Image (tube, rainbow, N blue to C red):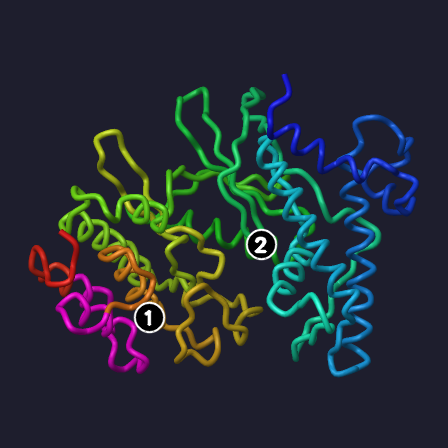
Amino acid sequence: MTTPAERRLERILRKYSSAELIDADYLELYLGHRNPFQSGDQLKHAFASIHERLDSEFDFMNTKARNGESGHFNADNSRELLGLIDEVRDLKSALEGTGKALTIVPEYERVLDGSKGWLVQSGGSLIPEGFTPVVVEKYDSVFGLADTALELADHSRVDLTLVGEGAYAIVHKFVDPNYDLTIARKKLKRGADERDIARFRREYEIMKGLDFPNILKVYRYNEAENSYTMEFCESTLEQYIKHRNNQQNFDFGTRRRIALQFLFGLNYLHRSLICHRDLSLKNVLLRAYSSGAVTVKLSDFGLAKPRDSDFTKTETEIRGTIVDPALDAFKEFEPVNDIYPVGFVLSYIFRGVKQLLPGSTPLGEIVQKCSHSDPKLRYQSVLEIIAAVENLEFRPEGTPA
């Protein structure tokens, strides 16, 4: 029996069924040399059709940017690209409804995500200053489906369930039948360049070298597919707090235990001479237990940098989710710059708000000192923040009971 999700996907794919409307070269990227009119190829037709039209718009965008025509991207082209962004979004959502995950090579995902901020429906769009030309891929596929199954070392196969997706990697979970444990697998997307592969492997090596309860544990790296397995956590900090923020039993004591675990993990990281450089509500995970207890885990070390690292691509390009405004270049990143986002994380843990708490309470004073605009006036070590949080009264003013 066809499910509503399957019917939705079928309906979306119907408009791509006419292979004769798609350039043969693009069809070949997804179908090979097979007959393009075979049944069951609608999804690949969709990939080829969207890919072809994206390349046309990207080529035109590059031309406009190079010619310096006031960075003007024509109105018709703006509308076409906005429509393509919607097509990709709808197709991705429909696939997720049927248990599949659409993958997009990082370069195209970068441009699609970035274009949303400056494309407009009428009058044309101003291409932003400093626009990085698109590396247009005409000779290899840019769309695909994430794995739905995984072969284990003993050659048994397990089903994969999509957990999350970033610009460069996708995360699934599976149950290892040998131990009856839920494991997560993070896999680099196809199309990543050598630098991205090196960064991904470096992320694994950093995490493999850390041994602390509040740091996510990784297990094994697979060279053949550029993936690694790690312990599975049920939710991000953002998801966990959002779900419980208004519950009476989610009291100050529980919130403080979560906050301290987060701080313990960051303190261990700094003692190991590593800066995380991308602390956020999504990069802190929580592992839940049947008793109701949770363990906080710092994760996503893709931007982390040990003090002796010579990995320099992002030395000047500042990246991350919560960026310290006092930071001029990534190469200058110090532990005190990791402390800046701590104020935002603590605000969310204790109050469930994403803005900094005002400094009118003891808790607010801690938050403001973490994220002070002047790094010299911040806490200079995580141990100082731990001591301040531990010394808070059981229910400081302005904090939910």
Residue drawn where x is 32% and y is 48% of the image: 242
Q: Secondary structure at mark 2?
A: loop
Task: Give coordinates of residue 85: x percent, y percent.
Answer: 68, 54
| Front one among 194 and 240 | 240
Q: Which residue is mark 1?
A: 340
Question: Residue 134 appears at what percent x and percent y?
Answer: 73, 65
Q: Earlier in the sequence, mark 2 or mark 1?
A: 2
From the viewer's perspective, tell me whether residue 308 is left or right of residue 245.
right
- Amino acid type at image mark 2: Ala
Q: In x, y percent, where is residue 60?
A: 82, 67
Residue 82: name its quadrant.
bottom right
Q: Residue at x 26, y 29 (%)?
A: 290
Q: On residue 213, which mark appears?
A: none
Marking on residue 167:
2
Write down the region rendered in magenta: 358-386
Residue 296 against residue 32 in the figure, above or below: below
- Tell me where residue 150 sits by quadrant: top right
102 up-or-down from 290: above or below: below
Identify which residue is drawn at 40% across, 22% down.
179
Q: Amino acid at mark 1?
A: Tyr
Viewer-side residue, 210 vs 179: 179
Return the x and y of residue 144 as percentages of the image width and height: 70, 41
Q: Hey, which residue is sitting farthest top in the picture?
A: 1
Residue 339 left/right relative to 332:
left
Q: State which quarter of the image contains the N terminus.
A: top right
Secondary structure category for the residue under label 1: helix
Say which residue appears at 25% left-offset and 76% top-offset.
Answer: 378
Residue 198 higher or lower than 156, as above or below: below
Viewer-proximal residue, 209 or 377? 377
